[in-house]
Image (tube, coloured by chain):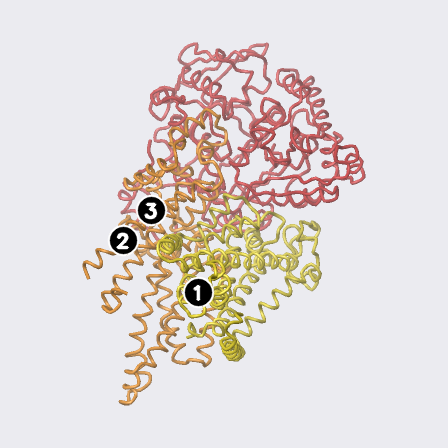
Chain colours: A red, B orange, C yellow
Amino acid sequence: MMFNRRISRRVSLLAAAAAVAVSGFVPALAQAPRKTLIVASNQDIPNFDPHVATGYSASMLLRNVYDSLVRVEGNPPQVIPHLAQSWTVSPDGMVYTFKLDPAAKFHSGAPVTAEAVKYSIDRLMRLAKGNAWMLAGIVGPNSVEAVDAQTVKITLLKPFAAFLQVLPWAWIVDHKQVEANKGADDGQTWMRNHLVGSGAFTVRRAEPGTLYEFERVADGWRKGGGNLTGAIWRIVRETASQRLMVQRGEAHIAVDLTSEDMDALKDKAGVVSVIEPEFRTFSIKMNTENGPLADPALRRAVSYAFDYNAMLASAGYAQLMVGPLPHGILGHDPNLPVYRTDLDKAKAELAKSKTPNGGVKLTMVYVNGLEQQRRWALVLLDALKKLNIELDIKPMAWPDMVASTKTPQSAPDFFPVYQTANYGDPDNIAFAAYHSSRNGNWQNMVYKSAKVDGLIEAGRAETNVDKRKAIYLDFQKQVVEDAPDIFGVLEKRKLAMREDVTGFKFTPVASNAIEYFGLSLK
Amino acid sequence: MLTYALRRIVLLLPVLVGLSIIVFAIARLLPGDPVQLAAGPQATKEEIEALARELGLDRPLIAQYWSYATGLLQGDWGQSILTRRPVWEDLRIYLPATLELVFAAMAIAVAIGLPAGLLSAAYANRWPDYLSRTLSLGAISMPRFFLGLLMQLFFVMQMGWLPLGGRFPLVEIPPPAVTGLITLDALIARDGGAFLTALKHLAMPAAAMSLSPLATITRMMRATTLEAMSQDYVTTARALGLSRGKILFKYVARNAASATLTVIGLYFGWLLAGTVLVETVFDWPGVGLYATKAIATQDFMPLMGVTLVIGALFVIVNLIVDLAYGLINPKARYA
Amino acid sequence: MSAAAPTMASARGEALKRGFYRFRQSWLSLVGLAIVVALAGLALLAPWIAPHPEHAAGGFAMNARFAPPSRVAWFGTNELGQDVLTLVLMGARVSLFAGVAVVAMAAALGAAVGAVAGFFGRWVDEALMRLTDLWLTLPGLILAMAIAAAMGPGVGNMIFAITLTWWPGYARLVRGEVMARKEEVYVQAARALGASPARLILRHILPNVVSPIIVKMSLDVGFAILTVASLGFVGIGVKPPTPEWGSLLSNARGYLPDYWWTAIFPGLAIFLSVFGFNLLGDGLRDVLDPRARR
């Protein structure tokens, strides 16, 4: 599919365009009024491959263009049927059997079969990129089995409590089309800008770095939903511009607003604010393997010196994290003893370290243009000054930052990370951010601890809720003692939308990756 | 004249080749690994090596330049990592937007600058002159991005009269592209509504862009007018009893304006290169914004493309100005 | 000045005197001078007169965020409770220094290229001037942005990047002047006495082309400051917490229109300093380079 249809579209809609007034929406063709939702976001979509792409913009695209076996909806999120009409779980939690919806079909017209499901999950695990880590060690090469065209049986390698919560991130592709364009890299080059899903929408026009226009698939298999005929994902880098666009009605939803933006929008007519807690952590990772911060005493000193109140004050709608896990998630202990600002303790820890008088220079990187991260970098600079430690703050482009996390030597001393939970289970944050198999990735560049690895694996495999809670409590204590991060804040999710957007249901799982299916415009 | 023009055009070729060599050399000398960037942050070592082979970046520099240069001639300006499209196609979309901005800015500058300069000269060293000179110095000193923000603050955030940025509303269909300049295309399509919409989008960026040429044109016009007024024919006309105003507007202004207008050609290239900041502030989808985004993502091929296109346009416009000047004023031809 | 030409020196003194008379006559130039002197003075004294010098080094006051301008904080405070007046004053040090440094380095580099080309002539001249002309056609700001971005943030890198795009103007100017001077009698005489080319250029030719260079430098400082701010504005420039005007404005952009003071004052500072240097440069041109006066 190529996206150069603009010219013909221009010609065919010329008559309509001629009738357009100065502002207002274009009625495309006389019979069906076009309802196009405009979302302002600051993140581009660098890759369309559902088994490789990450980032919330890509999640948005995949949620609308692809389908998964099950979905989650509501707050707290509930697992509901999607491609799978129903499923059964064996008593030991090892075997899941899904019955596919016979109506489900890909955009090519081919039905969504058990074979496609097997192919998709196998490809995800084979490539071992993108969201594959969620199922790593859980799903093996022979786990997925197509029993018949409509029945999929997945046999886990070991029990996984959050399995159904993770499945929404395993997107199902039209395997025949991928095979036809496989190339030498399992279709990765081709899939980067081709879509072979079964979702309610598809991409009509892609202008990377500027906008992505979605249109509803004619005769899609999923019935119901809202009245949107299309949507535009507009890349707007400045959050203030996003806010003004919603305020002026130039966009319907803005997804990257700051607390200041939310305050400015508070009593603006026609704008609805959504400020909801979400499992979205912000921490400053430390280089536990290379440089002065490899010394745990220095890390603890930094953790004590940091001004948590200043961080919270500049964060706006947020709360301080207590330990590595977000509040409200299974097993989180809100009374866990953690580091709070205490200069005496900081100096005591510093005295125990290899650099008892400070005198070193550390480096912190941050995403160029992310205002909130710049502020926190200054908060850290101020704290380190009190320990006689210098901080060199380097704004960088995100891809360069990610590239720097590959080895402990290339990684900076401090690396700030927002992490949004993809599923509402402690395993998500624990595994992605602290398991050593994730070293070299931005969520966990270097931290490794055999003890913590063991706890994460045990927590993952345990099905008894109380036992899991106990395991995650141990996990939290151990991580706090190691102090690999400055545990920061949980920012509330801040969205603003025009009041003529209806059908929006807040689900605290990557809620900025807007799903268009259920939305309507008045 | 024809042989002269031909000679100049032939001489253009080595200049363009030289330009491509410089651009290529700078791009290669800059730190940063284009292959790593093209492969993406999560690429493995093997994938990076394979890509380097595929892109030919493991060959000697001379060979790389040769394939780059021959590619340029065949319309292959490389691929943008960001837009995932050929650079040439991107430029075809973005260049008209920048040209529209530059033409509009130039039109504003000429429309205001010529009379202002004339006025300044007519009242040389009196208050209208001081006012116009101070204003034009102020205009040159005003950061375009700051003026842009001030205009947004007033016209958009305070009064709500104009759109914040962009070229045309997203959900509306622009008039069919003939010239690529939306205002012009709207006129061609006889679509008054679209014209007005496009004009509203164009107003602030063009105004911000016009400051610097406006100041220059005002100063040039003042200087040429003053010079013309000291010429013999003015003295003669005066002696013949023509009124000062008539001399000024009928004879002097015309001569001074034609001299001043030649600077416009020279200014054109400068303006093309100077749209970056205005395009950033107003989210104007031209080559400047394209270059800014490319710089932020260290996307080298578009950057080389933009540099080359602007450089080449600069050279070509200067040549046209020279030739046009030669045509008007034969004495200057071989200077 | 060259001791070999005392009469010339006194003639030049005479011209200078007349020049300064003209300069004093032009009140616009005086205004420019006043602005520049005031800015330079404020920049020099900033650490002592700024109300909260610690804010320019990254300090903050979260309990005083976004306070509007008042008698306590004349320019208000920003998103971190930092005093905007302090940031603007300390920013003057960065911006003025960077502007002057760019111009000085560009003049040095350009003068070197131009002098060599003009003095040696022939193929050296041909090659260097072709390069210079080609360089002049490149879009300077885009090039500077690209180089600065590739080198990473930092004042030094930024100055270096802008310098690389700024020298050709000086090369052309100096080459022309050197070509004109090298045939003059005192140069010929020195050459006859066996002076080396380096000595000829440095001792006998360059000192005599200083005034057009100074004129161009004074006219350029304003634009150099503007270019520095431009880089800061697009987010390629200094590292935090360096309070550079362009990046202050860029940060503040997100707080318009509610917290307008965070943007207006850095913007005005850029405007005022560029304006001051332009007025001064205009005046200096009248003094030092009467030929260009019109």
Q: Residues within 10 Å of mark 3 (few under 14, many from 20)?
A: many
> Which disc, if any, is residue B11?
2
Tag 1 secondary structure = helix
Residue in the picture at 59% in, 16% down: A160
Q: Which mark is residue B173?
A: 3
Residue C286: give x, y in percent of width and height: 47, 74
Considering the image in quadrants, where does the N terminus of chain A appear?
Answer: top left
Residues at marks 2 and 1 touching, judged by CB atoms closer than 8 Å: no
Percent x, y for residue C273? 55, 64
Cα–Cα gap, marks 3 and 2: 43 Å
- Host chain of mark 3: B
Chain assignment, label 2: B
Q: Earlier in the sequence, mark 3 or mark 2?
A: 2
Question: Image quadrant of residue A285?
Answer: top right
The chain holding disc 1 is C
Nearest to the eye among marks 3 and 2: give it: 2
Amino acid type assigned to the residue bearing label 2 in the image? Leu
- For label 1, the crowd category at 10 Å Cα-Cα, with few meaning under 14, some 14 to 19 and many 20 or more, is few
The answer, for residue A312, to whether it is visible in the render is no
Type of residue at label 3?
Ile
- A425 left or right of A47? right
